[in-house]
């Protein structure tokens, strides 16, 4: 490491990064991914989840570069394959806290089918989806979450497709815990992340994040600060709406779905293994 971290909370925070050739990072000025990454690391530190108890898995994209900056067990996989890779790690090492960290394109497009079936199986994995509504790393093409009519490098006259609601998809597919926050609401985001990390089963937090370099530029919103102000003005807490799934004017933040009754896949699979071993020895 390039320098010795100071003692106390700041030192504990910095100790969790690889402060070597990985830094300075590749993120653009004003990008929200750094905010989301820092908030995740603080959540892990405050929960007392140590580096030896954690594995962070990602695919391809700007958000998926995050595990490479962390000093813990990490797994940088193929495009869209973070969830099946994390599934394999969880089956081999069920005692680990498994976090999948990626963007809307990686997780909801090429990785969409894996997302659905991991939720259906109730894999004991926490998925943080950074939703900046664009394929940022490859030039600003529209993604599964780009709103209809909004512009992108591959939609200069507006996107004519309907967009995925990540949280709705997670709930419908069987996730145990579903929440949404933004990179403007940092304290709120940390609360949602900590709740997700302490749940058993498939947990999802959608992190609405700014990409001023591409998404913001195509929509002519302005810089990162302008985008954060837009998040502030166009979001509403779940406690202030009657039905979060029917809200049309603003996007809803908070815990949108929370259940406990379905056992995680790792527990069910272990029962099958034990039954097979008993049958084999009979």
Image: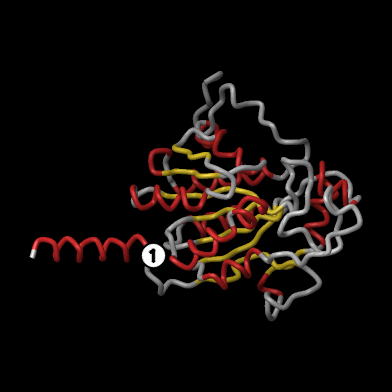
The picture places residue 227, in percent across and down from the top left corner, at 82, 51
Q: Judge the density around disc 1: few (<14), some (14-19), many (≥20) Cα neighbours within 10 Å.
A: some
The picture places residue 178, in percent across and down from the top left corner, at 57, 65
Query: Which residue does the image show at 59% across and 39% down from the upper left?
Result: 66
- The C terminus appears in which quarter of the rendering? bottom left
Q: How many marks?
A: 1
Image check: 86 left or right of 91?
A: right
As drawn, the residue found furthest toward the bottom would be: 242
Depth check: give the residue in front, 241 or 70.
70
Query: Which residue does the image show at 59% across and 59% down from the upper left?
Result: 112
Query: Which residue does the image show at 51% across and 67% down from the upper left?
Result: 175
Residue of label 1 = 264
As drawn, the residue found furthest toward the top would be: 2
The picture places residue 55, in percent across and down from the top left corner, at 45, 43
Give the quarter of the image for residue 22. Answer: top right
Give the quarter of the image for residue 25. Answer: top right
């Amino acid at each position: 490491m390039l320098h010795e971290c100071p003692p106390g909370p700041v030192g504990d925070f910095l100790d969790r990064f690889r402060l070597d050739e990985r830094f300075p990072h590749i993120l653009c000025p004003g990008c929200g991914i750094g905010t989301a990454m820092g908030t995740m690391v603080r959540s892990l530190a405050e929960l007392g989840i140590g580096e030896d108890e954690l594995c962070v898995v990602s695919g391809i994209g700007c958000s998926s570069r995050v595990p490479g900056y962390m000093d813990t067990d990490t797994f940088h996989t193929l495009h869209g394959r973070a969830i099946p890779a994390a599934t394999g790690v969880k089956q081999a090492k069920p005692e680990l806290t498994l976090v999948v960290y990626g963007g809307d394109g990686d997780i909801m497009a090429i990785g969409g089918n894996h997302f659905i079936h991991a939720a259906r199986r109730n894999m004991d994995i926490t998925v943080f989806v950074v939703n900046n509504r664009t394929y940022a790393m490859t030039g600003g093409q529209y993604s599964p979450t780009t709103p209809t009519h909004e512009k992108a490098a591959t939609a200069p006259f507006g996107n004519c497709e309907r967009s995925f609601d990540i949280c709705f998809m997670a709930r419908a597919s069987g996730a145990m815990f579903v929440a949404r926050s933004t990179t403007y609401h940092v304290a709120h985001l940390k609360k949602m992340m900590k709740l997700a990390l302490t749940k058993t089963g498939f947990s999802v937090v959608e992190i609405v994040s700014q990409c001023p370099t591409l998404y913001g530029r195509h929509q002519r919103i302005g810089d990162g600060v302008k985008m954060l102000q837009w998040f502030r003005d166009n979001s509403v807490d779940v406690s202030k709406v009657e039905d979060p799934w029917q809200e049309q004017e603003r996007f809803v933040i908070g815990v949108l779905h929370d259940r406990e009754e379905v056992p995680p896949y790792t527990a069910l699979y272990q029962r099958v293994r034990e039954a097979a071993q008993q049958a084999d020895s009979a």
